Image: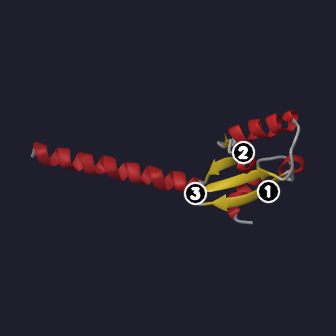
Amino acid sequence: MSSEVKRVRDGFPDELSKLLDWSEQGDYVIAKFKHFEPAETFRDLADIAKELGGEWVSAGKESHFRFKKPESKILALIDECRRVLDKLEEAAKEVH
């Protein structure tokens, strides 16, 4: 199990995390139900997922919880900072 999957999985109580199959897909950690679960269990899992920054993806039999990997968020912020710096440099050239 990767450190990213472990980090997200550790945010759930053991009795709930065992109900899910955990994997990675690109920039996301994915958690799918192993079996159909009652609505109360789903709500408990959804509440925890939301607290951890996850979201429910409704896709029929492929429905799952999805969590953006932290390094992907950091890389996106770095890219945004670079774009802002480029704009500032362009603006500074126009002033001089």
Identity of the residue drawn at 69% across and 63% down: 3
Amino acid carrying label 3: it is Asp
Q: What residue does disc 1 label?
A: 21
x and y percent of residue 81 in the render? 38, 49
Q: In the image, which disc is placed on residue 60? A: 2
x and y percent of residue 20 in the render? 81, 52
Q: Depth check: give the residue in front, 5 or 33.
A: 33
On screen, residue 39 above or below 59 = above
Drawn side of residue 63 relative to residue 42, left or right: left
**Circle 1 — which element?**
strand
Q: Are marks 3 and 1 in contact (CB under 8 Å)?
A: no
Q: CA distance from mark 2 to mark 3?
A: 21 Å
> Which image quadrant: the N terminus?
bottom right
- Of pointers 3 and 1, the one earlier in the residue sequence: 1
**Circle 3 — which element?**
loop
Q: How many residues crowd mark 1 within 10 Å: few (<14), some (14–19), many (20+)?
A: some
Amino acid carrying label 2: it is Gly
x and y percent of residue 21 in the render? 79, 56
Q: How many residues crowd mark 2 within 10 Å: few (<14), some (14–19), many (20+)?
A: few
Identity of the residue drawn at 18% across and 44% down: 91
x and y percent of residue 37 in the render? 87, 42
Q: CA distance from mark 3 to mark 1?
A: 17 Å
